Amino acid sequence: MATNEASLKVIREQLRGRGKDEAQQRMFLHAIHPACLAAQQRGQDTLELHCCKVAVVERIVELIEELPDDSPPCAVFTNSLIAVGNLSTMKPALEPELEIHLMQAALHAVFTLGTEKDTTQVQALHKIMPELPDAMLGNLLTESPETDMLHYILEYVNFWIMSRVSQERARAIKSSTALLRYTLPEFDNPAEFPRMGHHVAQLALFISDPAKDISRQPREGIYRLYQLLLH
């Protein structure tokens, strides 16, 4: 209980003060998991009695957008994506406008992460970064396991598939394929997916891509789409 109260205090202070200190921001992000865990242990599936989930997510989006453009994402960014995953287990579900804002901020930071700065930090980020947004998207899909939600997320991810930058295309195709692995048995009316052909066509364009890290991903993505249709 003491840990829970301390976590909630840190969250409220960040929401009120919008602290610029990175250490305070990390404390805020680290406090989200124990707050969600404590709520679940009480048999609750919401934080609304203690703080507003929407306000917390809006603050996380602000933190992502406040990151300097000329530096690689830092611990604040990686912990932001982890915190979003924790919050996805809590009700209420996010409104579409906030989800779009969150996806735009997070995926832009990940897909455009450059390789020109060959530092240990950037190399480490390249190893762990792709899994974090994939998990975040999967959590959003698990929160609303519907074909409309799948299409809604794929549409935004697939925007990056048409990028002229090969590393951005590769990351978008990988995220699209990873998202399709989250399709659940309880998916509602999977056969009612009129845009499936569009998504198949987008992935099929890159099956023969000369870059091996790009060409092998679309095959699995198309396989997953057909599995969903057959299910």
Image: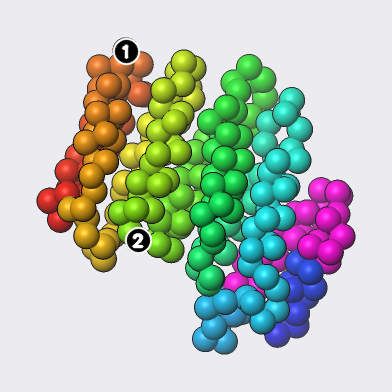
Q: Taking 150 as reference, is 53 left or right?
A: right
- Name the kind of residue labelled 2 in the image: Pro
Which residue corresponds to the image point at 54% horizontal and 83% vertical from the top-left? 44
Compared to residue 71, the image places residue 36 above or below, namely below
Q: Are marks 1 and 2 in contact (CB under 8 Å)?
A: no
Q: What is the CA distance from the residue labelled 1 to the residue labelled 2?
A: 35 Å
Name the residue at 17% across, 43% down. 226
Residue at screen point 54% across, 61% down: 94
Count residues near mark 2 (Cα–Cα under 10 Å), then give few for <14, some for 14-19, many for 20+. Answer: some
Mark 1 vs mark 2: which is more N-terminal?
Answer: 2
Would residue 170 be seen by someone viewing this image from the given angle?
Answer: no
Q: Name the amino acid, label 1.
A: Pro
Residue 32's label in the rendered image is: none
Residue 197, image x, y percentages: 21, 36
Which region of the structure is painted magenta?
A: 13-36
Q: Quadrant of residue 159?
A: top left
Quick check: can you spot residue 23?
Answer: yes
- Residue 25 spot, x, y in % from top left: 78, 54
Q: Residue at x 58, y 53 (%)?
A: 98
Asked whether 32 falls inside the magenta stretch, the response is: yes
- Mark 1 falls on what kind of element? loop
In the rendered image, residue 35 lying in the magenta stretch gets the answer yes
- Whole-percent x, y for residue 33 in the image: 62, 66
Front-most of 1 and 94?
94
Q: Which residue is disc 1 drawn over?
A: 210
Magenta stretch, main secondary structure class: helix
Q: Residues within 10 Å of mark 1 (few under 14, many from 20)?
A: few
The percent position of residue 43, horizontal first and vertical second, equals 52, 86
In which quadrant of the rendered image does the N terminus lie? bottom right
Q: Give the numbered dot on residue 145.
A: 2
